[in-house]
Amino acid sequence: MFDVWKVGVMAFELWSTSLSTITMRNHLWQTQPFFSPKMMQENQRMVTEKLEASMEAGLVMQKALFNSMNGQLAPWWVTSKHTMKPYHQRSSANSRRLAK
């Protein structure tokens, strides 16, 4: 049951850091011109990181699907934790970077 707790904590951290990152990015967009090199680089980085996290999460889901087809079922909390991990790492890193 401790693993289920860890998934809940990870989901809460992901939610809170995502909300924080969205707030800080909105502040940047309101205070700086969108065509400035700094903002263009930040926007490019944002999109690239989201695509990379989506691909990693998709790979985890494919691996879980193939394992289940071979009879190696993993509990939902294990699959959830592995799926959220790329988003959690990037969201936490973005929140720390933008807070500077």
Image: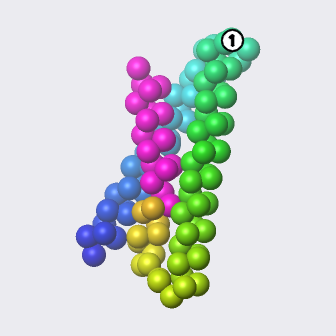
Circle 1 residue = 36
Residue 33 picture location, percent across and down:
69, 13
**x%, y% of residue 90?**
48, 41
Tell me, yes or no, whether the highlighted magenta stretch contains residue 35: no
Q: Residue at x 61, y 30 (%)?
A: 45
Judge left or right: residue 3 versus residue 28. Answer: left
Residue at the image point whose x is 32% and y is 62% from the top: 6
The residue range painted magenta reads 83-100
In this rendering, the answer to whether 85 lies above or below 1 is: above
Residue 30 seen anywhere in this rendered image of the structure: no
Asked if residue 31 can be seen in this view, the reply is yes
The local crowd at label 1, few if under 14, some if 14 to 19, many if 20 or more residues have their Cα within 10 Å, is few
Where's the N terminus, which quadrant?
Answer: bottom left
Residue drawn at x 53%, y 73% is: 64
Residue most extreme to the front: 70
Q: Amino acid at mark 1?
A: Ser
Image quarter (top left, top right, bottom left or bottom right) of the C terminus: top left
20 over 11 or under it: above or below: above
- Display colour scheme: rainbow
Say which quarter of the image contains residue 85. bottom left
Residue 44, given in percent of the width and then of the height, sits at 67, 28
Secondary structure predominantly adopted by residues drawn in magenta: helix
